[in-house]
Amino acid sequence: MRVKEVAKNLGVTADTVRFYTRIQVLNPQTNPHNSYKEYTQADVEHLKFIVASRALGFTVEDIKNIIAKADEHESPCPTVRHIIEKRLEETERQFQNLIALRARMTAAIAQWENIPDRAPNGHMICHMIESFSEGLNHDASN
Amino acid sequence: MRVKEVAKNLGVTADTVRFYTRIQVLNPQTNPHNSYKEYTQADVEHLKFIVASRALGFTVEDIKNIIAKADEHESPCPTVRHIIEKRLEETERQFQNLIALRARMTAAIAQWENIPDRAPNGHMICHMIESFSEGLNHDASN
DNA sequence: GCTACACCTATGTCTTAGACACAGGTCAAT
DNA sequence: ATTGACCTGTGTCTAAGACATAGGTGTAGC
């Protein structure tokens, strides 16, 4: 199979498959005539593993490490358990940040609903943002 | 003031200030002797605007556009109102994605709690991920 | 066989918002 | 004058692909 077909089968873009191939986390054979890549069923299974891992929040670097462990005939499972805990913590942090961001955005929109547009002057670029930033507590706790 | 002091005053890193200076969204004077940048109080106010905008989810490119509008003596407010709506929608999408990701992660961790580690074999890299991917519905609706 | 032409391919470059490395500058204490 | 701690600008790097482009494939019509 060639890249497009493989991609369509797994619901990802051809560029994604090319990317995995480029960084050698996927290693199809190359047709020496036109240098097209030829993906076997085993390659597809391999890609399926990669896609599933990505869907669980693993980075591509994580996946490389997991595969490396398996290539040494060691069980990658302890590594997998450890990494997903770490990634879950990060996700939780992002989640909190996103909630805070959304709160700031909706608060700003609400605050701006009742005030008029205004031309910029010497010390103001946009009075809406400028006035909103007054209420922002920029502490160093981060 | 020099970069570190400015950064500390606004609760960002010196690298962040240097970055804004590099892309010319901040334009301090340069000391011709040592090519150190010298930030005036006006520069600090300008940076304050940038930091506030970033805190509202605007991209640096957005901020450039807003400043460009203001430089043409046009009110940037309509632009600002428009952009924040767009960014809020994106944030909402990210939010949904993050919720779904977190659900997948916790589901995987729960599922893996009761199954043993296992060595990789010919057709499996990590049976935990592999078995989890079975339950994944990879549809094309995205 | 030849030529269009639609579609596909690999490769190189670009993206964000800074973080990091590093060679050199500053400045107060000696 | 020299040490040494700290600071500076500049160049490079990051993640995970997306995009641009020159060239290949393969079918249809002649």
Image: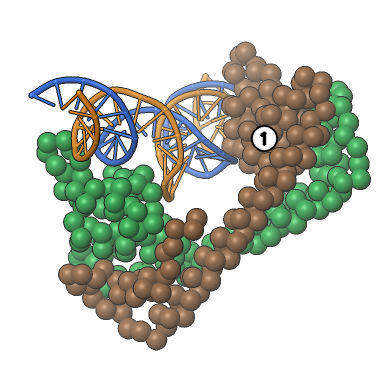
Chain colours: A green, B brown, C blue, D orange
Residue under the image location 65 percent in, 17 percent down = B31
Residue B111 left/right relative to A119? left
Residue B103 visible in the displayed image:
yes
Q: Position of residue A128 (x, y in %)?
A: 84, 39
Q: Within 10 Å of the Cα at label 1, are there few (<14), some (14-19), or many (20+) other Cα atoms?
A: some
Tell me where residue A36 sits by quadrant: top left
Residue B53 visible in the displayed image:
no
Residue under the image location 69 percent in, 33 percent down = B63
At label 1, the amino acid type is Asp
Tell me where residue B99 sits by quadrant: bottom right
Q: Position of residue B71 (x, y in %)?
A: 76, 21
Residue D6 left/right relative to A43? right
Tell me where residue D24 sits by quadrant: top left
Q: Position of residue A44 (x, y in %)?
A: 25, 59
Give the residue at the far bottom of this rendering: B114
Q: Position of residue A56 (x, y in %)?
A: 44, 65
Residue B135 left/right relative to C8? right
Identify whether A81 is placed above or below A2.
below
Which residue is labeled 1 in the image? B62
Q: Nearer the viewer, residue A22 or B83?
A: B83
Quadrant occupied by the C terminus of chain A = bottom right
Q: Disc 1 sits on a residue from what chain?
A: B
Q: Nearer the viewer, residue D27 or A82?
A: D27
Q: Nearer the viewer, residue D12 or D3?
A: D12
